[in-house]
Structure formats: C-alpha cells, structure tokens
Amino acid sequence: MSAVCALRWQGGALELLDQRLLPAQQLWLRCASAAEVADAIRDMVVRGAPAIGIAAAYGAVLAARAAYAGHGTGWRDVIVADLDLIAAARPTAVNLAWAVQRMAGCLAELAGDPEPALLAAARAIHDQDIAANHAMAAYGAALIEPGSRVLTHCNTGALATGGHGTALGVIRTAHAQGRIREVFVDETRPWLQGARLTAWELQQDGIPARLVVDGAAAWLFARLRPAWLIVGADRIAANGDTANKIGTYTAALAARAHGARVMVVAPLSTFDPATPDGSAIEVEERPAQELTCLAGQAIAPAGFAAWNPVFDVTPADLIDAIVCEHGVIERPDAARIADFLAALGP
Ligand SMILES: CSC[C@@H](O)[C@@H](O)C(=O)COP(=O)(O)O
C-alpha cells in the first residue's frame, strides 16, 4: 500500500496535494467550493482520470452545502449548474463525467438537506476506487513473468487515483511478488508526470527504476527488452481504442515492433461503451505555452506556434490486455468487451 495520497476530505472541505509542485514541495490546497474544485482540476492541481472523478464527487458535496444554505427552493438547480461546471473542467477522462453523473443521480433521489447523502456517495466512490485498484493490481500482476522489465508512461499511481494506482498499482503488486526486475519511467512531456510523480512514488516504495526520455521508447524495447508496456487510461471506447497520456500510442507501436506486450489498466469507470471507437473521443488540447516553456523558462523562440494535444488514442489492435477490477480482457475488441461487460450484469 502506498503512503502517498492525492486528496482527502478534511474539516468539511476537499484538500488536494498540489501535484504541480511535486516532488520539490508537498503543499496541500484547500477547496471549499465547487468552483475551486473545477479550477483545481483544470489547472492540474489534481490530475489522473480516477482522481479527478473523486475530486468531482467531493466538489458536488461543496456545491450542495452552498446551494442548500443560500438559494431557497432553487437549490437543486444551483447544484446541477455547479456539477456542469465541474464536468466541463477537462474533456478526455470519462471518469469525471461518470462521477458527476453518479452524484447527479444520487441528488435526484433526495429531499431535504442533500449534503450528508452526497458526502456518503462521494466517500463510496473514493473507497470503491481504492478497492478496484487492488483488484486490478492482482489481475495485472499475474500476467507478468517473474524478473521482468517493464515500461510505464505518465503517472498512474496513488497520485492519480484513490490510492495504490492502476498501471502503477499493477507494478507495485508485481514488484512485491518478485515479478519486476526494473521499471522504466517515461518522463512524459510536457508536464513530466513520469519524472516528477511516478519516479517519486517508485522511489518511496524502493522499486528499482530508471527514467527515460519519451523518445527513447523504440530504442529501449530494442536494447533492454522490457516485456511489457503498462499504462492507464482516460477513456476506453466500446471497441477498446484507448485514450491516455500523449506518447502512449508511440510507446505501444514501439512495443509491438519489438515483440513486447501492451497492458492497459483501468477501472470500469474509465470504460465508455457509448463511444464506439477512438475517433469519437475528444482529445484535450492545452496552451502552446505548456510546450514552449519549461519551469518558467522559454525553450522555443518567442511566439513560436505549437500543437499540444495532451492525450492520444492507441488503437485496440495494439493492446494485448485490458485489466479492470473484474478481470482481464485479452486482445480487446468490440465483441470481447461487450461480452465481458454483459457478463457483469446491469
Ligand atoms: C490512473 S491514471 C490514467 C490516466 O489518467 C493517466 O495515464 C493520464 O493520462 C493522466 O493525464 P493527466 O493529464 O496527468 O491528468
């Protein structure tokens, strides 16, 4: 179990470990309103698909408190408007919309002060994510041969989830079982989630790891032969096409070219059966400045243009296994995913 924690409900407010400052500083930022939660998600204080869903759920509690206290009989509409604000903070990770919808569903059944029931619902989303992480970790670790090297991209650990992690949860559990010889961590331009966050989590757990630049993927698979690329997901379309941090697709192509396998690890809240394939996934584009500046310093000529999509979509046929809390979908495609989900029941 990781000692790292991205978010907590404390003293009637949501506290977020400001991930923009890690690993240099550990500073907790307090959000006391839905608007502050939306800003924190947009500004990357909290990030990672499951973590922003959990933050959104607590944001609904803050929305409910303010609306019920201050808006007479119109409180329900005020909460719904705040939920829309939170849902719009980032477009790609479906966990955000999933959590907001779940909180809206809970709200629809309530009369009287909505805060206690919404807080219970938010805590349930948080607890269920942690339980899902541990279940996925067990399923995913079992796929890894003892003594393997693996590559991971972005941060999918306790900082990106309720705790333990998705892809990094698999790596944690696999390491504890003696299956991991070494982890390679993509630095993950431009926000450096790999270098700043994943490396920090791995170091605290004492898991042997080395950092590589994103562009090293093909050469790494050619020379040091990692057996698996293990990544998380922000949205998995009905046919298995998977949106994840920009650079995942490149790493998956490199893995396939060198006979390594690709594992996507994500809870059911990341599955989006309503989106038929990857072409329908909205990919967030962030300001050019996030590419052209590094740590406040210009690294491109002033005014130089940039295209900055922060996710890409890996086609399902490059993915060997999707691991969720209910098991493993090997060689995912639309039929296998539909059968898997149907077997889980309503
Ligand atoms: C469990 S996290 C899976 C993904 O959310 C993760 O790989 C990722 O792409 C996060 O992107 P970010 O932009 O840092 O929110």
Image: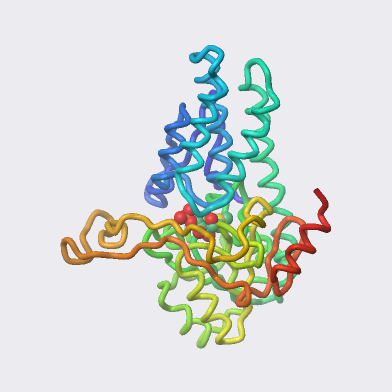
Relative side of 317 to 34, left or right:
right
Percent x, y of residue 107:
64, 28
Relative side of 102 to 216, left or right:
right
Name which residue lies at 31% across and 57% down.
Answer: 290
Name which residue lies at 50% across and 75% down.
Answer: 251
Comparing 72 with 308, the one in front is: 72
Q: Is residue 236 above or below residue 2?
A: below
Relative side of 294 to 340, left or right:
left
Percent x, y of residue 55:
54, 39
Q: Is residue 202 visible?
A: no
In this view, the residue farthest toward the left is 302
Name which residue lies at 66% across and 67% down.
Answer: 239
In this view, the residue farthest toward the top is 72
Q: Is residue 179 above or below residue 127?
A: below
> How many numbered discs, if any?
0
What scheme was used to colour the molecule? rainbow
Percent x, y of residue 247:
46, 70
Quarter of image, res 289:
bottom left
Name which residue lies at 67% across and 54% down.
Answer: 267
